[in-house]
């Protein structure tokens, strides 16, 4: 999603055990109460982005570092219901 010059990505993990993501020193909580952990985080296009995610799947919480990259050349415009908040194209 784009708001002015700021992009936001919806990240859905394949686990319900992630309870926090950190981007540029800012912590983000999940935006959902059930199912796989889902977060909305700010992103920069065409650059590697260092993120951390904390999982509580093990006996003690563990923070795992990831690098994500959003390639602007693969972006598509939303149309119809997608643009108005209808069925999402995917996460």
Image: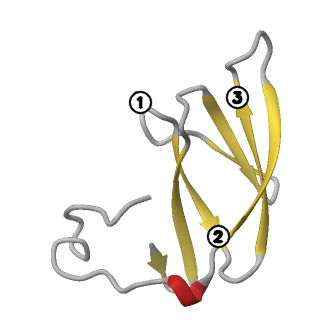
Q: Earlier in the sequence, mark 1 or mark 3?
A: 1
Q: Which residue is mark 2?
A: 43
On the image, the x and y values in percent for residue 39 come to 54, 48
Q: Quarter-wise, where is residue 72 in the image?
A: bottom right
Q: Residue at x 81, y 27 (%)?
A: 62
Q: Position of residue 69 (x, y in %)?
A: 70, 71
Residue 65 coordinates in the image, percent (x, y): 83, 47
Tell me: residue 19, above or below residue 75. Answer: above
Extreme residue in the bottom direction: 73
Q: Is residue 29 left or right of residue 81?
A: right
Front residue of 71/50: it is: 71
Q: Nearer the viewer, residue 11 or 30?
A: 11
What colour scheme does the image use?
secondary structure
Which residue matches tag 1? 35
Left or right of 16? Residue 45 is: right
Disc 1 vs disc 3: Cβ atoms closer than 8 Å? no
**Precedes in sequence: disc 1 or disc 2:** 1
Which numbered disc covers residue 27?
Answer: none
User: Which label lies toward us, 2 or 3?
Assistant: 3
Q: Which residue is mark 3?
A: 55
Q: What is the quadrant of the N terminus in the image?
A: bottom left
How far apart are the two marked residues, 1 and 2, measured between alpha carbons?
23 Å
CA separation, marks 2 and 3? 21 Å
Taking 35 as reference, is 38 left or right?
Answer: right
For label 3, count other residues whose C-alpha is less than 10 Å away and answer few (under 14), some (14-19) or many (20+): some
């Amino acid at each position: 999603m784009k708001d002015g010059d700021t992009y936001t990505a919806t990240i859905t993990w394949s686990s319900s055990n992630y309870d926090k993501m950190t981007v540029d020193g800012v912590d983000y909580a999940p935006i959902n109460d059930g199912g796989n952990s889902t977060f909305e985080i700010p992103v920069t296009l065409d650059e590697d982005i260092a993120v951390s995610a904390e999982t509580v799947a093990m006996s003690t919480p563990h923070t795992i570092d990831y690098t994500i990259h959003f390639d602007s050349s693969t972006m598509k415009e939303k149309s119809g219901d997608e643009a108005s908040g209808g069925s999402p194209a995917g996460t």
